[in-house]
Amino acid sequence: MKILVTMKRVADPDNANKVKISGDGTQVTSEGLEWKPNPFDEYGVEAALRILEDGVGSGKLRGEVVVVTIGPEEVTQQIRQCLAMGADRGILVSGDDDKLDAMIVARTMAKLVEKEQPDLVIMGKQAVDGDSNQASQMLAEILGWPQATFAGHVEVPEDLSSATVTREVDGGAAKVKVAFPAVLSVDLRIVTPTGVNNNVAAGKDYQEGPRYASLRGIMKAKKKPIDKLTLDDLGVDRTLQVRTVSFTQPAARSAGVILETVQELVQKLQDEAKVL
Amino acid sequence: MLSFELTDEQKILRDTVRDFAQNEIAPVAQELDEKEQFSVELTRKMGELGLFGMFVSEEYGGTEMGYIAYVIAVEEIARVDGSHAATIAAGNSLGIGPIYYFGSEDQKKKYLPDLCEGETLAGFGLTEPDAGSDAGGSKTTAVRDGDDWIINGSKIFITNAANPLTSVTVVQTVTGKNDKGRKEYSCFLVPADTPGLTANEMHGKLMWRSSNTAELFFDDMRVPGNALLGKQGEGFHQMLETLDGGRLSIAAMGLGGAQGAYEKALAYSQERKQFGKPICKNQAIAFKLANMATQIEAARNMLYKACWQREQKQPFQKLAAMSKLFCSEIFRYVASEAVQIHGGYGLMKEYDVERFFRDQKLLEIGEGTSEIQRMVISRYIGC
């Protein structure tokens, strides 16, 4: 079985307060920022590794995990980090964020699916920078594959032919079964200790969160291949459908007021906030 | 050509160890310190991550990531907690180092794979109650008896040598006199279960309270001839060489500790408001932080250069001594100012800078005092 996992590099979410907007308001500047794999994509890598685990602790997978990214040359560091976690190889398609939108990403992925013929594509439910949450749905549509988005729990049978996915939806969970090939997008709960059950390593409790890139993993990752491609190599239509007009910083929060009575509060909610 | 760029592997390593330290060690560091408790569980986890055997070849279970990578790892652990950085630094430089560099093929195969997995730990027995900086004052003796050796004496302040994971301790002994009439030293690998060995965990420490420190007693302890490390009479040289390398990791502990204390002080100074504004807006506080950041940057460059020299197989001893001295002393300045910036809260155990302030002091004493470092440096520069 082959799983394609997407990974986008994002500005370190722990340092989000350092994100600045350029003077003309058209760009988010990345100066001085540290880059990390998008957390939801790291969860995707972890999910892929858990799905393919052999259950006997050999460290070998029952298939191949390929990490795919679109970005500048420096993203090789984040790809290597995923390879150090245990993925087998990487594909880097060169591209700049400001010349991409979700549809171009989905079209690029569709071309890569054609080339790689995976049984499953796993994507983070969204990147924590743009928060678009569109690429996986668009990809499934282009491919005509079944999709299960916001996966919080995945169970696969021993023969790896399908997945029963518990999706996180408003106010609860929805359970769907998708036959492979399929597209999955994953949510936070997928990396809880019991987020994935592959019926081979059944009953195994994983560590909370994605695994660390161990030092042995880092050294092994040095020798793992990363293919480098361009959007032109893949013949991707690069017409942007989303045009960024401008960015603005969120307004600074103004100080609160302390009210004397409940009556006053209700009054203000009615007249000023207009929510009642 | 001058380049300050780390490799991808070193960058990934820093991220990984930082996340690990933040997620696994930080939440329990204060409690373990308070209880003066060594954590077998965390040591195993650090082993699983691969923090032991970083300069050991793959053949013996190491990762061969090199010295810069090793000090980055120690630095990142020390940024969060000195005790656990001590477990790693001593485990590698003092425990694994002598066996890897001076051990026979049999000894390496016997001990290194488990040590590199973090399944076991090794101690390094040099200091004695009456022989600290003056290692020539050692009284522990080994006397030949047929093929065996009989060892008598004691060692003190030995890291990683009295806990459930300890498998072996390197013990330096006096094995006679050489041609010049000077004491001849030889080292032995003493398994933890050797009859005649008593290993007591030492308590009541000011600092590194969740690292394991041992007092060892040898009472007619018999070890076989093949327990000798290298050749008879090589003990003094082996110890000196081990300490040269050990200085790099002690320096890394100073650097990492300073970085951690500085970050805590900076964050606190941005949040703490007095006289209607964050205290970092006061020049008195801002200049302290500027000094801290500058010293840390200088210390890091010096230490990384020493590691680079070692990786390039150039003489690194002078710069290693300078780095150990400088990183320990800037940590004293940074930790002290970090407490100062925290004011009254900095004196309380709930605030990490209180622990950093205590942990710092060892670095000016252990593995060669600052005075000894200055002696070493002064000899190198021709005094």
Image (cartoon, coloured by chain):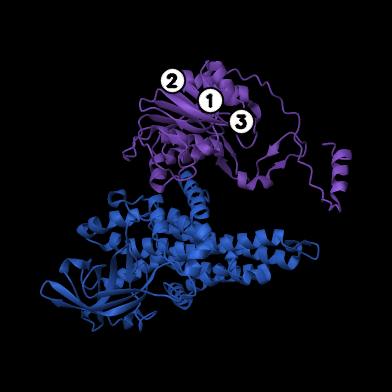
User: x and y percent of residue B383 in the render?
Assistant: 46, 78
The answer to whether residue B192 is seen in the rendering is: yes
B127 left or right, relative to B81: left
State the SS at label 3: loop
User: x and y percent of residue A60 in the render?
Assistant: 34, 36
State the SS at label 2: loop
The amino acid type found where label 2 is placed reads Gln
Q: On the image, numbered disc 2 is attached to which residue? A: A117
Closest to the observer, B219 or A72: B219
Give the chain letter at badge 2.
Answer: A
Closest to the observer, B75 or B28: B28
Q: On the image, numbered disc 3 is attached to which residue? A: A96
Residue A57's mark?
none
User: x and y percent of residue B280 in the render?
Assistant: 72, 62
Q: On the image, numbered disc 1 is attached to which residue? A: A148
Same chain under badges 1 and 3? The reply is yes
The amino acid type found where label 1 is placed reads Ala
Closest to the observer, B5 or A264: A264
Marks 2 and 3, the one that precedes in the sequence: 3
The amino acid type found where label 3 is placed reads Asp
Give the chain letter at badge 3.
Answer: A
**Chain identifier, purple in the render:** A
State the residue at coordinates (48%, 30%).
Answer: A5
State the SS at label 1: strand
Marks 2 and 1, the one that precedes in the sequence: 2
> Rounded to the nearest whole Å, what is the CA distance between mark 2 and mark 1?
19 Å
**Chain identifier, blue in the render:** B
A128 is higher (above) or lower (below) than B195: above
Crowd band around label 3 with a 10 angstrom C-alpha radius: few (<14), some (14–19), many (20+): few
Instruction: Find out whether the residues at labels 1 and 3 contact each other: C-beta distance under 8 Å.
Output: no
B84 is higher (above) or lower (below) than A199: below
